[in-house]
């Protein structure tokens, strides 16, 4: 039985287009250039922030983010950033009695923006607010703390095999690998961690069938 569904954020619930476009504009490089570099580092299995370091090897990403905020070019999220299956799927899960949690590697500002959108979720938290980030085990221990369900009754849904699926499984959670976004597509059929997920889905709507069949 699935009692709690926990969702990653980037490329699971929201598109990252605006995020990377804002970085490209701030660093004054063509958006396509940065997008291509993100794809390159993803293909190599590196953290996507490495794309910024390919442009500026000595960049302090956190410090540069604070400069953007201070200059009025901070992070933005609204309804247009959501994938179209997000709101209806989360609402139907809640209607089915499933606890819905959003927990991803995001900034504290992103957490504020997500909560302001009044999504059908019982809790929205970010790695910055917790002080630990995926794939660290501490992150998934926090997930278990707030799940209000046993690990085998909790499913973590995400697109990134190394950040989402592998460490969630290691913590004892059920997992659903979402084939969406660059990580989801690139590693869907060539990564043993993705293949080991309990369920492999192409849209969040498919998660409803998973819950109905297990409950």
Image (spheres, rainbow, N blue to C red):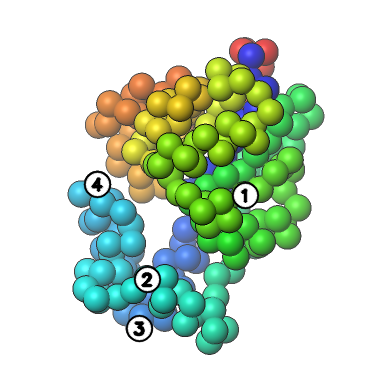
Name the secondary structure under disc 4: loop
Who comes first in sequence, dot 4 or dot 1? 4
Above or below: residue 155 compared with residue 21 = above
For marks 2 and 1, give the CA distance. Answer: 22 Å
Q: Residue at x 50, y 66 (%)?
A: 18
Name the secondary structure under disc 3: loop
Q: Residues within 10 Å of mark 2 (few under 14, many from 20)?
A: some
- Asked if the residues shown at circle 2 and circle 1 are in contact, with their CB atoms under 8 angstroms apart, the answer is no
- Asked if the residues shown at circle 1 and circle 3 are in contact, with their CB atoms under 8 angstroms apart, the answer is no
Name the secondary structure under disc 2: helix
The residue most toward the bottom is 71
Who comes first in sequence, dot 2 or dot 1? 2
Circle 1 residue: 125
Give the number of the disc on residue 186. Answer: none
Q: Is residue 186 left or right of residue 133?
A: left
Q: Residues within 10 Å of mark 3 (few under 14, many from 20)?
A: few
For marks 3 and 4, give the CA distance. Answer: 26 Å
For marks 1 and 3, give the CA distance. Answer: 31 Å
Residue 207 location in percent, x, y? 58, 27
Q: Nearer the viewer, residue 207 or 55?
A: 55
- Marks 4, 2: nearer the viewer: 2
Residue 76 location in percent, x, y? 59, 68
Who comes first in sequence, dot 1 or dot 3? 3
For marks 4 and 2, give the CA distance. Answer: 19 Å
Number of callouts: 4
Q: Is residue 211 visible?
A: no
Circle 3 residue: 28
Circle 4 residue: 45
Above or below: residue 198 compared with residue 201 = above
Name the secondary structure under disc 1: strand
Who comes first in sequence, dot 3 or dot 4? 3
Give the number of the disc on residue 61. Answer: 2
């Amino acid at each position: 039985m699935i009692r709690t569904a926990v969702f990653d954020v980037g490329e699971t619930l929201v598109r990252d287009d605006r995020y990377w476009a804002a970085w490209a504009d701030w660093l004054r490089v063509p958006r396509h250039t940065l997008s291509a570099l993100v794809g390159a580092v993803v293909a190599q299995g590196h953290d996507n922030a490495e794309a910024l370091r390919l442009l500026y090897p000595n960049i302090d990403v956190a410090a540069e983010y604070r400069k953007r905020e201070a200059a009025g070019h901070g992070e933005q999220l609204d309804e247009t950033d959501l994938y179209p299956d997000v709101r209806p799927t989360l609402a139907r899960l809640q209607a089915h009695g499933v606890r819905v949690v959003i927990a991803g590697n995001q900034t504290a500002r992103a957490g504020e923006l997500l909560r302001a959108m009044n999504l059908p979720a019982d809790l929205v938290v970010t790695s910055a607010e917790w002080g630990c980030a995926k794939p660290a085990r501490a992150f998934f221990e926090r997930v278990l703390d707030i799940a209000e369900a046993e690990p085998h009754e909790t499913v973590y849904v995400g697109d990134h095999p190394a950040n989402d699926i592998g460490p969630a499984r290691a913590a004892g959670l059920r997992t659903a690998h979402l084939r969406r976004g660059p990580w989801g597509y690139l590693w869907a059929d060539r990564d043993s961690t993705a293949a080991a997920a309990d369920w492999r889905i192409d849209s969040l709507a498919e998660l409803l069938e998973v819950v109905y069949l297990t409950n």
